[in-house]
Image (cartoon, coloured by chain):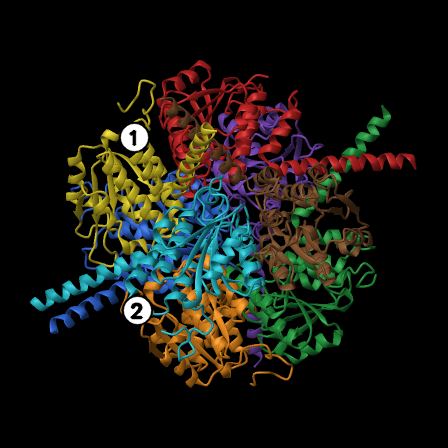
Chain colours: A purple, B blue, C orange, D cyan, E yellow, F green, G brown, H red
Amino acid sequence: MGHVLPSGGGKALMNVGDAALLLLDHQTGLFQTVKDITVAELRANVSALAQIATLLKLPVITTASEPEGPNGPLMPELAELAPHAVYVPRNGEVNAWDNDLFVQTVEKTGKKTLIMAGVWTSVCVMFPALDAKAAGFNVYAVVDASGDPSQMASRTTLARFAQSGVMPTTTNAVICELQRTWRRPEAAEIADIYTVATPDYRTVMESYQKAKDVGSAQKQYQDRM
Amino acid sequence: MGHVLPSGGGKALMNVGDAALLLLDHQTGLFQTVKDITVAELRANVSALAQIATLLKLPVITTASEPEGPNGPLMPELAELAPHAVYVPRNGEVNAWDNDLFVQTVEKTGKKTLIMAGVWTSVCVMFPALDAKAAGFNVYAVVDASGDPSQMASRTTLARFAQSGVMPTTTNAVICELQRTWRRPEAAEIADIYTVATPDYRTVMESYQKAKDVGSAQKQYQDRM
Amino acid sequence: MGHVLPSGGGKALMNVGDAALLLLDHQTGLFQTVKDITVAELRANVSALAQIATLLKLPVITTASEPEGPNGPLMPELAELAPHAVYVPRNGEVNAWDNDLFVQTVEKTGKKTLIMAGVWTSVCVMFPALDAKAAGFNVYAVVDASGDPSQMASRTTLARFAQSGVMPTTTNAVICELQRTWRRPEAAEIADIYTVATPDYRTVMESYQKAKDVGSAQKQYQDRM
Amino acid sequence: MGHVLPSGGGKALMNVGDAALLLLDHQTGLFQTVKDITVAELRANVSALAQIATLLKLPVITTASEPEGPNGPLMPELAELAPHAVYVPRNGEVNAWDNDLFVQTVEKTGKKTLIMAGVWTSVCVMFPALDAKAAGFNVYAVVDASGDPSQMASRTTLARFAQSGVMPTTTNAVICELQRTWRRPEAAEIADIYTVATPDYRTVMESYQKAKDVGSAQKQYQDRM
Amino acid sequence: MGHVLPSGGGKALMNVGDAALLLLDHQTGLFQTVKDITVAELRANVSALAQIATLLKLPVITTASEPEGPNGPLMPELAELAPHAVYVPRNGEVNAWDNDLFVQTVEKTGKKTLIMAGVWTSVCVMFPALDAKAAGFNVYAVVDASGDPSQMASRTTLARFAQSGVMPTTTNAVICELQRTWRRPEAAEIADIYTVATPDYRTVMESYQKAKDVGSAQKQYQDRM
Amino acid sequence: MGHVLPSGGGKALMNVGDAALLLLDHQTGLFQTVKDITVAELRANVSALAQIATLLKLPVITTASEPEGPNGPLMPELAELAPHAVYVPRNGEVNAWDNDLFVQTVEKTGKKTLIMAGVWTSVCVMFPALDAKAAGFNVYAVVDASGDPSQMASRTTLARFAQSGVMPTTTNAVICELQRTWRRPEAAEIADIYTVATPDYRTVMESYQKAKDVGSAQKQYQDRM
Amino acid sequence: MGHVLPSGGGKALMNVGDAALLLLDHQTGLFQTVKDITVAELRANVSALAQIATLLKLPVITTASEPEGPNGPLMPELAELAPHAVYVPRNGEVNAWDNDLFVQTVEKTGKKTLIMAGVWTSVCVMFPALDAKAAGFNVYAVVDASGDPSQMASRTTLARFAQSGVMPTTTNAVICELQRTWRRPEAAEIADIYTVATPDYRTVMESYQKAKDVGSAQKQYQDRM
Amino acid sequence: MGHVLPSGGGKALMNVGDAALLLLDHQTGLFQTVKDITVAELRANVSALAQIATLLKLPVITTASEPEGPNGPLMPELAELAPHAVYVPRNGEVNAWDNDLFVQTVEKTGKKTLIMAGVWTSVCVMFPALDAKAAGFNVYAVVDASGDPSQMASRTTLARFAQSGVMPTTTNAVICELQRTWRRPEAAEIADIYTVATPDYRTVMESYQKAKDVGSAQKQYQDRM
């Protein structure tokens, strides 16, 4: 399936073939300072992004500035969910875009659309997002796979993204923008990923399945009568 | 009444003669994942949009991506409130603008102003809104006749609409922008529609009517004295 | 079905055979001062109480202190949903229990369990609730079919009910406490009443019905293959 | 009108003939530390209590612990709204009930029902409330004419009042409990007091009056036709 | 004092000599549907705007679309606080800019900077704001002297103002932007106006005055020793 | 370890040897109407209760009133986490205590302390809790492993539990009350259960482990120098 | 000063001569799971309690269950602010009252009034509070010097305290209840402690001092003229 | 370290060598009217900005319009934390940019990037920010080191900053943007500054240090075995 369809669909959407996922400083010590989203939701959303990227074969780059320090280790589930991710250690730079190896790793992917998430949103996402935008990339900031130390910081960060041309988005929207259609072989796996990011969707699917079974059983029963 | 009045009024408002209403994926399964508005308010607002479109003869297009699946059926009151609506089934496309028939149906209306609402706002409204904007349409997104899976998603979606030139609006504003004046034959019917979207307005009207009756009765009583 | 079952069930619950519903000052002018619940929810909950009382044949008494004044008329849907309700006009008493006719009307029902709701909760429900309790009745206060002028008032009122032995409850709980079992002829009508008080329940039922139909249709389809 | 009516009404309510109003430390410096209610609402509620007490001739006692210090002067409108109030200066006691003159002044009123409000609720109201209760008085604490330094303090204070037998109440409820009936000469003045404590009620009355005038004028117009 | 000072100050601020205040549909019936600000705050802010405009001799235009209907009368304090205001009745137009007389009245002031407030913000302010902007005016929308029927509408309206070039602002900011300096003869009157819009400021001033008096008295006392 | 220790500890706590866990109507359809807790938290808390009960060998009873209907199937993870649970189907009774088999199953455990959780709290937990209390059991209601259709219902339910002598508690408190000490063979498994109910605790443990490893590695490095 | 004054004051208050402060598990790891109060406020309140206890010579007992584990060390400022505190290590008991040494240390103080605070409120405070109450102590639980893992847990804990006869209170109320009067030598030090627990009070005092100085200086200036 | 690194990093970030910090009207009287952030957080954030500016030798300018009046003195900790700050008294101008001396002092620093914070955000920050922007400066507004009198004002101010090209940011982001890397001699001092602005970060560091010590001690212990 091409990126832009004959209908014109997709012209203003992200191009799955041109996209890479950058996960910045998702460290368990930093998580404890996040106050604009629960840590449970944050981890679930990051996991869902890692899963969809793995499924659809997007390059994934992870990084941490001081993983031996109080900021803590990267959330361990990333290693499992995106085993193909490239980890770039930093030399104390707060802004990942200040690190030569990081920028080279991004450039080596050949992708011009960068999907970024990290903790803190206002710093670890904002700084490389602004610099990447200045360097000519299309940049998406996934605000609910990121975390900020206050609600006020969260609102401010959103306004600054919008002002600077970085596109703010959310985990569900990214998954949908990459998926585009349910008529694809990975549909069932994608449905599972939604239940990670949207637990309410899981109850919807469970209820649906049960009701369908009831309908089927009643039909069978009626047929027998 | 013309769209732009001699006073200059209406120059920056939507043109009722050029507008179509697109209702995207208002499915009862998806409703259960909406967390930025109550389902009761969401349904009332969608109903009010359908009613005003029917009253003022705007084209209405409804669509659903997988109505046989867990996302559930379209909210049934749409069939009753906008019987003239054209329903476009999709073939699994998440983005309605990816579907040829949908885009053709929109184009066949001949309207260049699209009023969109749907569930999820960040996906089912955002994607076709961005693509329609890219295709040259004037696009309004009715955020309170739409729903997103979290408050954070809701705020993010609003920022992205504004950033991309899609005009965010609300149900009441749309009704007013289409109505323009109370000196029109449909005034009473429009007043009824407001009570659907704004239940507090209903109490205001009931209280008013009662007080007017009291005033009238007291006058009558005084006249007799 | 008896009130207390052989299992001991119902011993601590309200007795449908001994209960009357008192709706106090649900006037549209007063509604405009309610700030602890939306007016839409308040009206829906009062309507649901009126419907279940009518269905299960509980006596209903309505009253208003000054319906000709700014407090406005009783919400008009009561007349339709509980046509058997007895309306007691008052002579300016704030506390319905101060009115002889009201107390006599209550006593004439012969019921000792009073389910009360009204606006304001802290006044129009609290005062007769306290006095009825002092007169030996079992009193339930339905807090979400009532309304108070602030969140702070609402919390305070709840604490005072609990302190004084008036049992605080909610609309859904009252319906369930009266219903007791789904194996009764009125089950379908009761299900409809739930959708009035809990609009989310409506989407659950609609989704369920659709999914059951899909299951049934697929079975039929499979059978044909 | 007696306190307990033939209907039994009023048996569980406060007795206007036996009540005194105690306003404790409503000082402008302390107001700046109040976080569970806006200062505007707090002042309006205290003013309304002072007005109803003056109108219905309840004894009023005001007090402050260190009015020359940072806690600031008593809110000046009290002098105007309750000119008959007795002011008891304290000698640094935090708990007004620790001050001999204060307790004597209370006892001299001969009233056994004490309506208390003050800042902070958890201290300046709680301490004398507990001691007065221990001394045999019936004590009401008006939580929205009082203020606490956090929402958490506010909730905790409410729970402790209820636990200890102090009756928590609100300004509107106190006015209503003292008023009892609209058929009294002071009805118009009482209506004005409600608009102080409940500004929404003012809009209801203004709208009512206008609508009644419209009704009367239309009747007159119809009569002329 | 000139608008732009030698320091460059004021270059980006509103010009008091070029400004007019437009108060749109502040009607007591509509107030009852406002849910993004309390009615008490809304009225106080509108009053403060009327007062500063009167004090600094800005033209004021008021208008209402259907003051005989359920929307109710204009809030009566406007007549007192801005006696020089010109009232423009409308003929049922929702958008004031659709009314010839209204636009002519605006143009007759000769001012190019319009400060607008009204109820609903999303309609009665938004529509003329967009049209005035299109007609070449500088437009400020005072969001806390306006009201919308939900928090979601309020956020959406703010985003649409910003997107369209209408400058969102608040009552305090407008007063300050008009005042510019405390070294002016009207300083004391302006200070009074702040206490209307910001009740907390009143307690600050009262506490200050008392403390200053205490300081003065102590000095006097020390001098005597 | 005995229930009451020589220190007197445990005298007022629940007795693990005398306790059974009752899980009432945790059905995926009902989950979609829960509004006082997120479904993700609710499921996690129920899962944690099931795990601790399995680990510590408490009897578990599950039940559902109409699992073939719109209320949906029991949450499927219960079967896995508490495989020893006894499932009691009901015959349409809303109140589990109305069902003979249910009460017999409870009595057969021989336990007098019942830990209850369910959906809705105000109905499916409240009714059997009140009846069990009346039948002489000690009853704990786990409010965050239960769900109610509104915040107002949630607060009301809590007040009614407290008023009636049912002890309100939370998942973490129950786990701790059953655990009593970390010096027991199951300590590591219990720590895992906490991370289910309190995801923030997981980040604390991950950060701790990493920091301890860093400390250990640095020591090793220093030793080598 | 005696505990109960001639006025009767203090009869229902805590007796400073009979009170001890118990600080339970204020560990930095646990702090990261607290969600009903900010950690900054929690630490400030605990510090203020430690300071007032030190100033007024109340016995202080601190304890931790597993300070070498992920729960982290006791907050270090306790050692400085209450150097006389006795630290009781525990052997893995969750409930401090299960530990013989802890109960003995409490008993050795000879005090019968216990002021408790800790993390989690629902566990580390609740369990020893219930057991101490059962053992005949008067128990106060300081809810804002304690922390719980959710708002729902916090509300539930408060209800269970009230139900069981444990008196819920807050830091400010405890300080005031211990202080009783400003006419004591430690008044200035107590004022400093308030600024720790109530930062807004600090601005009130700073503003007061400045204004008093201004008053004094103006007087001096006037005297010279 | 240069501002823009070879990687391209820093191109879109603020340049520490070109920046000055302007602290506008942080007066204790005004603090009492701030309602969009707690005063404790506001003071902590301003302190952190002063500390980082002092550490990294940025020019700091403070100002107040009427420090002898009710607005109160500048927060006293500024004198200690930024002893090199230049204080510019104003002559009653609300807008600091209206004051010649202020603008000259800014220009004398030779910096073109201005980091502004103050109270009220909507006035004392907004006005000079707009004028400085118009004069060609790059302007950052630190919203959480500033304060506004309502949440509505806060949101409106943020929108107006974004609309006008003033960059909204937060204290943590500014510190990070100035710091750029942990591999610098001041790293430990910067870490201390973070604990001022983010108290949760302090618990993370304390827990980390303890866990590292435990790891080190266990290693030592194992080595000995």
**Where does residue D143 sit, x and y in percent of width and height?**
48, 56
Q: Which mark is residue D184?
A: 2
Query: Which kind of residue does numbered mark 1 sit on?
Result: Met
Residue at 39% across, 38% down: E205
**Where does residue C208 sit, x and y in percent of width and height?**
51, 67
Can residue H106 be seen in the rendering of this structure? yes
**Where does residue D225 sit, x and y in percent of width and height?**
7, 67
The residue beneath circle 1 is E14
The mark lying in front, picked from 1 and 2, is: 2
Q: Nearer the viewer, residue E50 or H14?
A: E50
Q: Which mark is residue B139?
A: none
Which secondary structure, mark 2?
loop
Image quadrant in which you'd find residue D57: bottom left
Which part of the image, by quadrant, shows the C terminus of chain H?
top right
Which secondary structure, mark 1?
loop
Which part of the image, by quadrant, shows the N terminus of chain H?
top right
Have a look at marks 1 and 2 and say if they share a chain: no
